[in-house]
Image: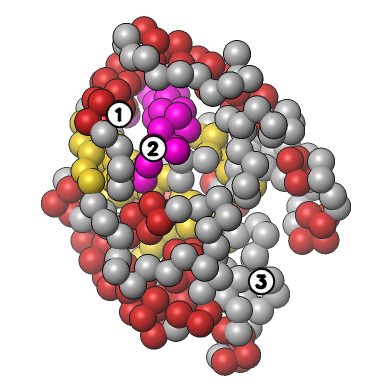
Amino acid sequence: MYAFGLCIDRNYLTPGLVTVAALADSLTPSARRGAALRVLTLDLVPAHVVLLAHLAERAGFGSFDAARCSPLRASRMADTSYISLTTYLRFEFTPAFVRRPHLIYVDADMLVRGDLAAPLHGLRAGEIGAVRDEFNPAVGESPALPGAAERWPHLRGRPYYNAGLLWARTSDLACLRAGVRRALTEHREHILHNDQDALNLWLLHHGRVREAAPTYNRFEVGRFLERGDWVRRVVTRPLRPDPTAAVVHFVGPEKPWQAACPPTEDVREYRALLRRTMRHVRALGAAHPEPTGMR
């Protein structure tokens, strides 16, 4: 028994709807009935929440709930170029809100293709499931956690994880939140990638990770190759689209629901799902507009 956790604000309502549809597609009908959806937000209005609830019901999820809340007071936004304070809400899920033994946190800028529940098997008490970041794979070898490798040389080369997809027992959520708060309070000078750096600081000093396979958080790199070759110096795997990826993550400022985004193969796949999702939205009678240029 598990719940998917999403953090959605007004700017991410459309991709949030797409994520709900993608999660539904990734599961069998019986698995959808057993799964829950939990949404945290800073600013969604009641009509937005009703739309998400109706789509979740139409998709066949067994349970839906949403709540407005605020992030940690210690939250630090070092990078605000395309990320908002909503990103810190991933640490605000509680057992009372999730009401399931396990939480699978999913960023709203992902294309989910496969069942995300498998990494829960074998997840031990006190462990957080995560996937190594493809652009910042190790401490001290990338811009992430500035100065940390110099301050703690024994951490150099340790894995650095992406926060876009996380698996946790709900009984461990309070410890996760407290650890991130401690990192933000004691080591603010090492925060560059906002909540993700805070998460990794806690994991490096006090947390335990059960590392999931890279295919559970495969970055879409074609958009970056359209602009330059720096990705070839950072990512060592073949840079063509990976049909085995359970998740394609559209990291960075260009997103597939934006008309100006380069139409790579993975972007086109995402846009097909977006159009199908919007047909479901219109069938529900909602007046939520499809993004410009996506028809």
Q: CA distance from mark 3 to mark 2?
A: 29 Å
Q: CA distance from mark 3 to mark 1?
A: 36 Å
Q: Is residue 153 left or right of 286 when viewed as pictured?
A: right
Amino acid at the residue labelled 1: His
Q: CA distance from mark 1 to mark 2?
A: 8 Å
The residue that disc 2 covers is 10
Q: Residue furthest left?
A: 96
Q: Residues within 10 Å of mark 3 (few under 14, many from 20)?
A: few
The residue that disc 3 covers is 143
Identify the residue at horizontal 39%, vertical 78% (top origin).
Answer: 183
Q: Is residue 168 left or right of 289 when viewed as pictured?
A: left
Identify the residue at horizontal 83%, vertical 61% (top origin).
Answer: 233
The residue that disc 1 covers is 48
Magenta segment boundaries in residue numbering: 7-31
Sooner in the amino-acid sequence: mark 3 or mark 2: 2
Amino acid at the residue labelled 3: Pro
